[in-house]
Amino acid sequence: MTRFARLLMALSLCSAQAACAAEGHRAAPTDPYWQNATVYFLLTDRFANGNTKNDHAYGRGDDAAPLRGFAGGDLQGVIDKLDDGYFDKLGVDAIWTSPVFEQIHGSTDEGTGRTYAYHGYWIKDWTAIDANLGSEQDFARFVATAHRHGIRVLMDVVLNHTGPVTDRDPQWPDAWVRTQPVCDWSGYAGAVDCTLVKNLPDIRTDSDKPVALPPQLLAKWKREGRLQQEQAELDAFFARTGYPRAPKYYLIKWLTDPVREYGVDGFRVDTTKHVEPEVWAALKKESGLALADWKARNPNRKLDDRDFFMVGEVYGFGANDFGATKGRDYDYGDRKVDFFNYGFDSLINFAFPQQAREEMEPLFASYSQDLHGGALDGVGLLNYLASHDDGGSYDRARKHTYTAALKLMLAPGAAQIYYGDELARPLTAKAEGDAQLRSSMNWGDLKSDKTRALLAHWQKLGQFRHAHPAVGAGVHKKLADKPYTFSRVLGDRDRVLVSIGLPAGDKAVPVYGLFADGTRLKDYYSGREVTVSQGRVSLDTPFALVLLGQPLPG
């Protein structure tokens, strides 16, 4: 029985009404696939421009402050890189794109200069793809192309707020949103029952009161010739679920549509801690049903029977009781919430950029202890070096790029590559605020031997992780200090050995009983295959690093 089937069995004891269906549940262990997965996070607008004809949709201007307007990246650009094999060579298991729904058409100026919604987090219409990024057909091709390469798609979803109000984007009705108070972080209510920042209207996710659709949305659908279709789909959704027509359930319907229609594999959930946890349980339930429906209708297109996956952005949550983390709980001060009990398989590890400053062994050992028998036993953790909104990124100046890659890609837990980590894309662009972290992908740097060598380093580490789930999901054990050598063992399913600091040229590497004599192994860093003899393998490579694993069937 799958994890999702167990959840449905538990929820079947409830009625179809929302309050019951959204109850929390004790989370089952996270699939080792997701405990080890390499996730590539890209800002769609900044990654690759595959169609210059959509660069100025909706009449958006070129008058933005530096790096605060649309730069031309789109879904076609991502498709092109998929077809080129870029993600395959990097060992990527899943692509997480910034939100692709239609954004506000206007701009804001809150002290950082004129800003458009290039980043995707200022949604205007959850039922349409933003034309700057492409069409619904482009999105469908993107998901299908990723699946053909064996890569899963994680949509970045926003349920907490609409986009800001501008002269082109009116506020949604008061029955849908609140505009005050602004969150002051004073306990649970000060983070949830409030609007995140000024002029970012907060969806009334706490309400079960039925509301009418926003008039501006009805008028938009009518202009686009899809009013009757959208209304009919909503009628069918509410008839099937029995949910009241409250704001959160409209959004759950809209967010799960791409799952049911195109087979989206999972969500990265934005602003998780600012929404009632029961809402996430309902979203997970409906997402799981939607993916199961798509797989039933598309048996020849599905990758496998894995359940729908959900990873949350709970700002301040991290390994080893980092920040506001208390075990598995996020502590608001007056209430603790275990988000793993509300549909989440994994949470982003905000501790990693700081803890990565440690030496590898204490870092790896503490993470393994936390994830295997410790406070985070059996759940998922998504580590990262840099992101679109973390000014405290590890190695922001890109001075330790090889070591940074080793720490991220060899750490216990899943790994999130932020677009350009593998090319040392600058994180200190001349711009205000978070825009410094969001420069366009530096494809031109691949002309440099130095950048190509760095990319090759990331590719080897990524291929190692992709082939061996023990790297991220296995139990860590130090085997030697010099050269630094460790193993990772995932039950009887997989095992690997890593040795760092070896001499260039001929080297004999002990396997410490991890592999029997006669076992054929591959060194994923040099690409050489070797056989264990007298408890060791012999290699002649110019590298100081060895990544050993037994090639797995399939």
Image: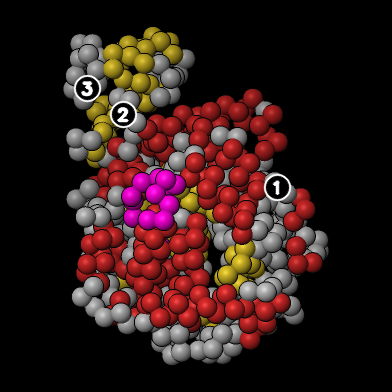
Few, some or many C-alpha atoms within 10 Å of disc 3 (few <14, some 14-19, many ≥20)?
A: many
Q: Residue at x 33, y 50 (%)?
A: 305
Residue 156 pos. (x, y %): 51, 60
Residue 69 highlighted magenta (yes or no): no
* Quadrant of the image containing the C terminus: top left
Between 378 and 141, the one nearer to me in the picture:
141
Mark yes or no: residue 37 visible.
Answer: yes
Q: Main secondary structure of the magenta part?
A: loop
Residue sitting at 75 percent across and 62 percent down?
Answer: 57
Q: Label 2, on which residue?
A: 553
On the image, numbered disc 3 is attached to which residue? 515
Q: Which mark is residue 377?
A: none
**Residue 300 lies in magenta, yes or no?**
yes
Tell me the element at label 1: loop
Real-space Cα separation, disc 2 to disc 3, in angstroms: 17 Å
Left or right of residue 479, residue 457 in this image: right
Q: Secondary structure under badge 3?
A: loop
Q: Where, by quadrant of the figure, is residue 507 drawn?
A: top left
Q: Position of residue 202 (x, y in %)?
A: 53, 80
Query: Which residue is located at x 43 percent, y 24 percent?
Result: 525
Q: Quadrant of residue 136?
A: bottom right
**What segment carries the magenta color?**
296-313
Q: Which residue is mark 1?
A: 49
> In the image, what residue type sits under mark 3?
Phe
**Mark 3 or 1, nearer chain start:** 1
Q: Considering only vertical position in the picture, is 68 above or below 532? A: below
The location of residue 498, given as percent across then percent down, is 33, 28
